[in-house]
Amino acid sequence: MSDSRSLALHTDRYELTMLDAALRDGTAGRRCVFELFGRRLSGGRRFGVVAGTGRLLELIRDFRFGEDELRFLRDERVVDAATLDFLEGYRFTGSITGYREGELYFPGSPILTIEGTFAEAVVLETLALSVLNHDSAVATAAARMSVAAGDRPLAEMGSRRAGESSAIAAARAAYIAGFGATSNLEAGRRWGIPTMGTAAHAWTLLHDTEEEAFRSQIDALGAGTTLLVDTYDTREGVATAIRVAGIELGGVRIDSGDLPLVAAAVRAQLDELGATSTKITVTSDLDEYAIAALAASPVDSYGVGTSVVTGSGTPTAGMVYKLVARQDDAGGWVAVAKASTDKGSKGGRKAAFRVLDAGTATSELIIISDGFEDLSTAKAHPDARALQVALVVDGEPEAAHGGIAGVEAARAHHSRVREELPVRALALSRSDPAIPTVYRDAS
C-alpha cells in the first residue's frame, strides 16, 4: 500500500532543470544506465542491509505529476512549457534490477541498476536515495542489534523519535532486519508487522496507587500482560505486581536504572516470590552496545526506540545515484564515470556475486562490462551466489517484492543471508568491511 499523495515533488530541483535542458538539446531520449551504490559503509559498519526496495517500487509505480504539482512548477517557473507537457504524461517505463530487499551489501555493490531514457531515470534519483538511504541505515542498525540480542526478541518502539512517515518506514526496516514487533499501529496495518504495547508511566500516575493501576491493567488485559514496575520504587513495584497478578504474571518491564544490576535484582526477587516464569523486558535508551552488555543478564526481551529509528548514530547509508553508461548518437553504449577525488565511480553495467567458501562469504565480486553484450551469469561462478534480480520490467514492478508478502520475503531472505557472514562481521566495533569488494572486467 503506497502513500496516496503524489511524491513527484519530493525531488531536488536540479533533476528537473537537467530534464528541461535535456529536452531542449535532444539528449533526453538517450538510453542510460544509472546505478545506486555506496562508496563505503557508513559509521565503520562491517556490512550493510538493503531495505526500502519494496516501498520504492510502489512509489515509482505511482510516481506522477498531477495538476497541483504542475501548477507549482509553472508558477515558480522551474521548467518551461514543453517540460511541463512531458511531466504531465510522465511514467517510468524502463527496467530496474538490483539486490533483493534484506540482502547484505558492501562498498561498490550495485544495489540498484536503473535503465531507461535519461528523462525517465534522472527524476527518480532523489526519491530512490531518500528511501534506500533511510531504510538501509535503520535496517543495518537493527541487524547489529539483532546480532547482539541473539535469540532474545526485539521490539521497535521509536515512533515518537522520528517523523510520522519515517517512523512507519523505520518499523518496516527494523522488522526486515530481525526485530519481531513494533509499537506503531500504522506499520502493523500497512505492512503486517506484529504490534505490541501495554502501558506507560502515565498509566500508573493516573491512578491513586500503583496497585490500583496494576489491578486495572490486569482486569483489562489479563494476567499475561506486562506491568511497568519502575514508576516509583522498582522493588516495591515488583512485589505489588506479583501480589496483584499472582505468580502467573506474564512479564515486568524495566525502563530505568543500571539495567544489568536492576535486571539481576528483579529476577532474583521474582524467583523468590515464586514467579519463575514471569519474563523481564528492558527498554531505556538501548542500542546494540547496551544490548550486548546485557547478554549475561537475566533479560528475556528488549524494546528499542531512538537508536533503531535513527540508525544508531548513522542516520543515512550514504548511497549515491550515478550515471554509469549511456548510448551515443549512433546507438552504441559508452561507459561513463565520475573521476573526482574520493568520489569516483566505476563506469559500465555490472553483475554482482557473493563468493562463498563452505557457505561463508569471502568476497563481493563485481563484473564490469564496457561492451554490454554479455555480462557474467551464475554458471560462470559456481562458487558464488548471484545477487541481482529483476525488480521492474518495462515499468511494471515485480509483484513478489511489494506489499506485506514482500516484507515477509525480505525478512526471510535477510535471515538466510546473514548466516553467510564470517564471524568477524558480527563484531560491533568500527572496522573495515567484513569482506572485500573485488572488481573484474567481463572480458
Image (cartoon, helix red, strand yellow):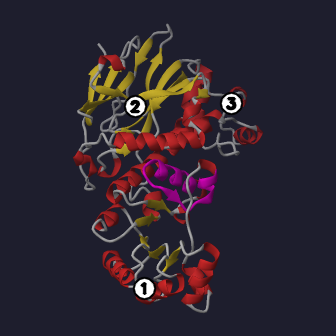
> Which residue lies at the image location 66% right of the left edge and 33% below the top edge?
79
Classify 394 as above or below 132. Answer: above
**Quadrant of the image for the N terminus?**
top right
Q: Is the magenta stretch mostly helix, strand or loop?
A: helix
Q: Distance between the residues labelled 3 and 2?
A: 28 Å
127 over 353 or under it: above or below: below
Residue 301 sits in quarter:
bottom left
Tell which circle, 3 or 2, labels the residue nearer the N-terminal end. 3
Q: What element carries label 3?
A: helix
Q: Quadrant of residue 383?
A: top left
At 55% from the left and 22% from the top, the residue drawn is 116
Which label was assigned to residue 234? 1
Q: Position of residue 132 (x, y in %)?
A: 48, 43
Three-letter code, disc 1: Thr
Q: In the image, 90: left or right of 133? A: right
Q: For mark 2, give the secondary structure.
A: loop
The part of the chain drawn in magenta is: 166-189
